């Protein structure tokens, strides 16, 4: 059978336009394989590239990956510095590939909380890929759904004082959407979490209102193309109702 044959045989509307992934289980993968946690994170970073290309081949348009949460600062100093180093190395290496493959790269999260060099690198990659249209890859870095909402509300409140003025009664869901880090992205159709935990850990709280969830025990570094294909086929078989009646 050809690569991704089952997915490619689906009607296009059955394929999720936006897949979001909570890539969890790097540490446990390392433990199972008698490696260091850092090696787990390294293998996890490599897997982002594999899954990005698989998404592109399957007709997905947007992929958003949760790389570092606002709560992950609670980890040991060593682990946090390794993750930051890995993000820098990855973005640096990824810039060329993204341009070659016409991938637009974005980062969501509170960039203000990152080091100057990482922030500069992020802005550089975003700028260098801003006109590319083959695919949209978004990294959530120092991202928390509640933090994003707090920043959005502050932006909206700030806009209202005093001259520009958004009167309270004119604030709609669109106003909030536009103030979020994800303003340019559609809501995720499919949210995948690897690593066996059944929670969303502060990821895309507003945006996942009607996303389909897919949980798997597979650790992120082991979540390969075939696992992704399985998740997408599972999604394709679901009926989304958005509060309406069963058809
Ligand atoms: C996910 O793997 C990566 C990040 C949160 C940065 P973990 O590091 O959370 O792996 P586990 O959950 O400990 O196995
Ligand atoms: C979620 O994983 C955050 C990321 C994948 C970046 P965690 O490992 O931090 O989540 P919890 O602590 O198990 O909820
Ligand atoms: Mg974890």
Image: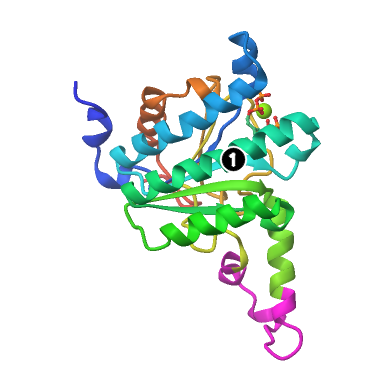
Quadrant of the rendered image holding ligand 2: top right
Mark 1 — residue?
Answer: 87
The residue closer to the viewer here, 140 or 169, is 140
Q: Is residue 132 positioned above or below 189 on the image? A: below
The residue at the point 35 percent across, 34 percent down is 54
Residue 145 shows in this picture: yes
> Helix, strand or loop at disc 1?
helix
Instruction: State left or right for residue 157 relative to residue 173.
Output: right
Task: Find residue 206 and report its horizontal and vertical position in percent.
Answer: 62, 54
The residue closer to the viewer here, 14 or 130, is 130
Q: Is residue 53 positioned above or below 188 on the image? A: above
**Region in magenta:** 157-178
Q: In which quarter of the image is the N terminus?
A: top left
Instruction: State left or right for residue 9 relative to residue 154.
Output: left
Task: Find residue 236 and report its horizontal and vertical position in percent.
Answer: 35, 36
The residue at the point 69 percent across, 87 percent down is 165
């Amino acid at each position: 059978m050809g690569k991704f044959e089952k997915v490619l045989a689906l009607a296009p509307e059955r394929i999720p336009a936006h897949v979001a992934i909570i890539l969890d289980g790097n540490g446990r993968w390392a433990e199972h394989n008698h490696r260091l946690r850092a090696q787990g994170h390294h293998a996890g970073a490599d897997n982002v590239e594999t899954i990005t290309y698989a998404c592109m081949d399957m007709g997905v348009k947007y992929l958003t990956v949760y790389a570092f949460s606002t709560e992950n600062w609670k980890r040991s100093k060593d682990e946090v510095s390794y993750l930051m180093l890995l993000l820098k190395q990855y973005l640096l290496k990824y810039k060329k590939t993204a341009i070659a493959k016409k991938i637009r790269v974005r980062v969501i999260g509170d960039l203000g909380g990152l080091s100057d060099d990482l922030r500069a690198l992020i802005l550089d990659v975003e700028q260098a890929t801003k006109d590319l249209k083959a695919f949209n890859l978004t990294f959530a870095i120092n991202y928390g759904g509640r933090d994003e909402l707090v920043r959005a509300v502050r932006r909206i409140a700030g806009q209202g004082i005093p001259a520009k003025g958004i009167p309270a009664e004119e604030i709609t869901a669109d106003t909030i959407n536009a103030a979020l880090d994800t303003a340019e992205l559609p809501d995720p159709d499919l949210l995948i979490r690897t690593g066996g935990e059944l929670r969303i850990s502060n990821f895309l709280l507003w945006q996942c209102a009607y996303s389909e969830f897919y949980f798997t025990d597979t650790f992120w570094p082991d979540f390969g193309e075939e696992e992704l294909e399985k998740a997408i086929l599972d999604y394709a078989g679901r009926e989304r109702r958005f509060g309406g009646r069963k058809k």
